[in-house]
Amino acid sequence: MRNSVIRKFLVLSLIFSFIGGCSRLDPAQLRRASQTKVLMGTYVSVDVCYERGKAAALSDAYDEVWARLKEVEGGMSIYDPQSEISQLNRSYPDAVPVGHDLYYVLESSTRLSELTRGAFDITVSPLVHLWRDSAQEKRIPTKAQIALAKDGVGMPYIELLEDQRARLLKSGMSLDLGGIAKGYAVDEAARVLRSKGFQDFFIDAGGDLYVGGRSCKGTPWRIGVRNPAQRDQIIDVVEVRNQAVTTSGNYEQYFEIDGQSYSHIIDPRTGVPQKGIVSATVIAPITSEADALATALCVLAEQEGIELI
Ligand code: ADP
Ligand code: MG
């Protein structure tokens, strides 16, 4: 995977960090703290390098990081009927005010949809539900059902108004931020840590990572990508600094119908789960963008994806 971001065979799964250090501070003085919580349906872990005298500041920073992550989750979770996104999903045909976080993610999603020629599309939700429900009933959706669900799919059906309001333009449509919200949350955690004076850290939200600065031993953070075909093997190691590393794929989360597995990533153009690309890993400066791009790269044909990158 050194030169290519897409693998047709099974890539990834868990991502490991290996230690490093910090150029500005004396690595010998640096300690590594680590906290993990379950948020956004996954394990989120935050590792921070800190000096001995900064333990109290670090404790405050952790509190703020977890509070901020909860706030982002609270706004963007489609599983919480009270979340802002759920309220927006019920708001057709009215224009409703949305908070800064949601507005930013809706704007980014629009841009990323254009960039990926429609492969990334947060209006895909009716199709996700159709395939999920069908899998539960152990049947493949009919063409008519797919066509019906697809009717409300399309980014132009989201209208963003300048006074930070949003409007859904089709009845039956709904938005699913599963392909970008985790990345946004990671960016926000990184921003909080930096605002508290911590530059060297490692954030992992279930495979969506961001690494700040260097590791606690003064070397670049090293991220190993596990080969899920042989889970005891690492398929590649990347060394990064102030970058996001995100992975999407069809082997960890999928629906099963008649013994066949179907990706949880849907091709919005056809209404059918993507196949072909087993995993895509993206390295980029902004985690929300890397998150969305990794999802899109699973939808696009291999050549098209590589050209996009
Ligand atoms: P993970 O949640 O495993 O990190 P992704 O970032 O690839 O995976 O996001 C996949 C989720 O995004 C799906 O579970 C679904 O909620 C949503 N989704 C599915 N297909 C698309 C798509 N084409 N564009 C945007 N979001 C999608
Ligand atoms: Mg994604």
Image (cartoon, rainbow, N blue to C red):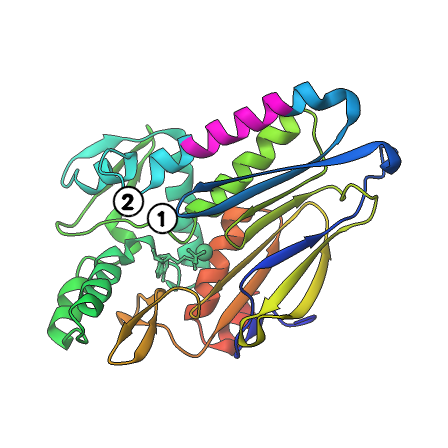
Q: Which residue is mark 2?
A: 78
Q: Quadrant of the image for the C terminus? A: bottom right
Q: Position of residue 176 (x, y in %)?
A: 31, 50
Residue 202 position by quadrant: top right
2 or 1: mark nearer the eye: 2
Q: Which residue is mark 1?
A: 177
The residue under the point 71% across, 34% down is: 199
The residue under the point 27% across, 49% down is: 175
State ligand 2's quadrant.
bottom left
- The alpha-carbon separation of the residues under discs 2 and 1 comes to 8 Å
The residue under the point 82% across, 48% down is: 219
Residue 251 position by quadrant: bottom left
Q: Is residue 224 above or below residue 218?
A: below
In the image, the segment drawn in magenta is 59-70
Q: Quadrant of the image for the N terminus? A: bottom right
* Label 2 CB-ligand 1 distance < 8 A: yes
- The answer to the question of whether label 2 and label 1 lie on touching residues, with beta carbons closer than 8 A, is yes
